[in-house]
Structures are given as C-alpha cells and as structure tokens.
Amino acid sequence: MTGVGWREAARRRLESESFDLLVVGGGATGAAIARDAATRGLRVALCERGDFASQTSSQSSKLIHGGLRYLQHGDFRLVFESLAERRRLLDTAPHLCRPREFLYPCYAGRFPSPMLLSLGVGLYDALALWQAPVRSRSLDADEIHRLAPWLRNAGLQGAQQYVDCQTDDARLVLENVLDAMTSGAVTLSYVEIQPDLRRSDSFHVAQALDRERGERFEIRARLMVNATGPFCDSFSGGPRKLRPTLGVHLVVDGDRLPTQGRAVVVHSPRDGRLAFLLPAGRRTIIGTTETDWPGRPPRPEDEIRALRRDVDYLLELANHAFPPANLRPSDVISTFAGLRPLLDSGRANQSATSREHAIWSDARGWLHVAGGKLTTMRSMAEETVNRAIELLRDRGLQRALRPCQTRTRHLPGTGKASLLAHNLAPDIAAHLNETYGARVDQVLALVTADASMGRRLDAELPYVAGELLFAIRSDLACEVEDVLRRRVPLALFSKTHGMDVAEETADLLTRERGWSEQRRAQSLLQYRAAVSASRMWHDE
C-alpha cells in the first residue's frame, strides 16, 4: 500500500512476517532485485537506510545508454547487454526512457578520428541490432553549425549524430519500488540494517533500526542480499571488491549553455576524458568527473559532494567545447555528486575500469551484488534473483515460483493519460506526462480538487504544487529533502534551490503525517543542510 500510512503498515509486516529475501539497499540495484523477486512469488522485504535512490542512483548522468565509449576498452558484452536493456525500457517504461539525439564532434589531432568514430557508431548500431529509435548518421560542417552553433570550430573535422535515452533516475528507482510493493514486497525507507546476523531455525535474523522512530527491531529472512552499491565493501566487511569513483555534475541555465535540445559529447582539454552537455528543460547538465575515492571504503554518512576543483574542471571542459558560453562559477545553479560502485579491475585509468557487476555469497548468510550501471539494473537484478533462488532451493525452499517477469512487465507509469481537458501550459503538460506517465491522472485529481495545487512552484520551471502533495501521499516521500531533491527536484534545477517552497513542503508533511513542530523543524534543517553542502565548493 501507499498513502500516508504505508510506513506503519510496512513496519508491522517487517516485524511480524518471515521473508525469503531481505534486500538491503534501496537504490537502483536493490529496488530492481526486490521487484524481480516479488513478481516471481518470493516473499521480499526491502530496507533502505535513507530515502529510496538517495545516494548514487539519483546522482547519475540520467542516461539509459549502451556506453559508446566502452567500445574502446573492448567491453562489447556490456554494451550489447546495455543496449538490449535500453530497448526493453523503451517498451516497458517509455515515459522514463526518452530518446535523445546525441552529437559527437571530432577534432584534428584528438581521439577519435572521424573514421574511427564512424566505425564505432556503426558498431554501436549493430550491437543494438539496428533497433535504435533513430538511425545514426554523419554530419557535414553546415549541419553541425546549424545543430550546435556555439560548438568550437577550430580543428572541427566532422561529427556523428546518434540516439540514446535520458531518464529521471530517482523516479526510475521509485517506480521499481512501487511495482515491488504492488507485487507483495514490504518496503521501508529510513531503516538501517546491521551486517551481523544470528540464526533462528532456517532463518537469519537481522537487527534493524527505524531511524525515523529511533526504535530497534528484528527482521527474519532465509537469505539476506547486500545491494548497498558503493558502500558494499564497508557493509560486508570482507575483502575489498570495489574501486569507487566520484562523479560530479553541474547544472547551469540553458540560455548560458544552449544545446538546442541535443546532448553533446565533449572531451576535456586537460586530460581528454569524455563527458556530456545534457539538455534538461530550461537547464543544461555538465558532467561528469571520475575521481578515485581516497582511503577506506566509503560509508553512507561520508561527505559526498562537489569540490571546487571539480567545478573548475567541468567549467573548463564546457567552455572549451562551447567558447561563446564563457561560463563562470557564478553561473552554476547547483551541483550533484555520487559514487560509482565500480569493480576494482586493477586498471590504472578510472575510465577504463569495468562497469560489469559481480555476485557472490558468504557463509554468514549474505548474497552480495556490486558494480554495474543504471542501464543494466534490471538484468543485474534478474541474475541476482536467479542466484538467490539457487541458494534458497539449497536451503529447503520448495514452493513453485514464476519465471522472471521483468523483461516484459511494464512499470507503473506505463500507459496513456489524457491531459487535454486540463488546459495546462505546454511545458507543464510535457513535464507531467514524462514524469508520471499514466499516473498523471492521480496528480491532476489533486489539481481538480484544489485549484491552488495547479500553480507553478517556480516561474521558470514546470513543477506544480500538486506534485508536492502527491510525493507525500503516493510516492513514499518522508522528508522535505525527499520531496524537493528526488520527487520534485527544485533543489537541482531552481535558482532558489527550492528554499522558497521548503516551508510549504514541511507544512504539507506536518499535516499529512501528524508531525510535531519539533519534527517539522528537524526536516527543514536537514534540507537546508543538504542544500548548503551542495554549495560548499564556493568557499574553497
């Protein structure tokens, strides 16, 4: 169930029931595993220390892609798998897998050459089985200038145009969680699981802390799954498997860095590393960096943010690609940063580090999964659940289960909804349709019931007030930060970072969830601290 009582119902079930799987980690991997396992008929619990997708899975470049650059490292299997998953998402979640034209220019004396780029894009199309939404093509100088008039001309030799897809990464994770719940999984955010287990009959027992209530309780499951992403090593306590790298992105005004609605592939003039300029409505995203995480394995409580050197690096990259932009630090609206859970392959170059994943079990009762990328979250989950079922069969599970359902099963927002009767501004209609898909009728019902719910939250952006309430009632948001960073992401795209609607959001949470004034103040303080942390680079 969703609704404001979902937490209480989930907590009761977690304490009273026994499960086949307890999945720890509510990012892309954990959410997809819970969905896959629940749709097969396993009894599943999913617990996340913070909000769903609160770490890496909401801090990506927001792409569903094969990874054209992985071809140069010989990762053909990964590219093929990724392109197959892109094709599946286009069918099962078209509102969250939106085709986007990519422009890849090449320059004299820089990798790749026009011929090599053409061969690479041709191979990319072949690995997609020639089923890309639009076929790629070579562009001449006139076409390049027309499509990207601010692009650097010096040394320009040609360009390729191809198609990949953009997504809302946090919402993709959320819809996996919602579908897992529809299929019977018990999911709860703000619950911290301890890695040490004890045995009770044929079950393992995990100690859990409800971080919202400050209460401890136990969860019983036959098998525990560690899907904590970049925190896998610190959680498992075993030999290190990962080489986490920090990826930082900048958000700037689209007028200051116009991409004409296309993604542009660029290379850093400093080290040649590939990055993207990505359209995001009225904004442009610049990213990403790839810096090794120093020292011990990262933990969720670590400070993961942009540093001044990251901002300078990305501004230099963008200005080199689009000289007329002349971006300065004052042009940066926001930053976001996350750790990639890359497997340590021993390669010296971070960019060459594998995006493959690994699955292994230990004697304590844990099944671990690490590595991978957002695009392959579903296939990685399928493989993990296959392995989990083998272990469960060895431990006595006998009841019949369904085969994997997620290859063709639609996510909750898939389907058609009509916005014509609501007389919405074109940008608002497009945003609502792309964000909620068939669920948009539930958002519009709030607007119909109260006209004030249809007002814009920011004059430049398409978000409306009803989305705040929908986030709390139907999209599992528990804190101001959940609402304004991951459901209605004003923190990323508004020049005020959503601070001007934070009080309103806190009031809605207080009304809907029966908060005290102290609890309301705590959530507001947490949100303001998160916004402040994303801007700390200014003072470095």
Image (tube, rainbow, N blue to C red):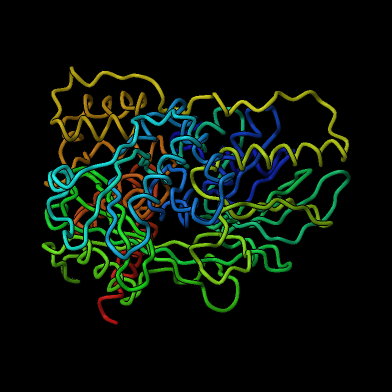
Q: Is residue 354 above or below residue 386?
A: below
Quarter the C terminus occupies: bottom left
Q: Nearer the viewer, residue 230 or 507?
A: 230
In the drawing, does residue 127 fall left or right of residue 153? right
**Looking at the picture, does residue 497 appear above or below residue 512?**
below
| Rendering coords of residue 112 (x, y %) | 37, 57
Where residue 228 appears, as percent x and y from the top left, is 60, 56
Quick one: 146 or 388, which is closer to the camera? 146
Residue at the spot x=64%, y=32% of the render? 38
Q: Measuring from the top left, give residue 494's x and y in whole percent.
A: 20, 54
Residue 49 quadrant: bottom right
What residue is at 47 percent from the left and 51 percent from the top? 57
Drawn side of residue 63 relative to residue 297, left or right = left
Extreme-front residue of the structure: 115
* Visible residue check, residue 210: yes
Residue 132, given in percent of the width and then of the height, sits at 40, 31
Q: Is residue 457 visible?
A: no
Residue in the foreground of this view, choosing between 228 and 326: 326
Q: How many marks?
A: 0
Q: Is residue 338 above or below residue 165?
A: below
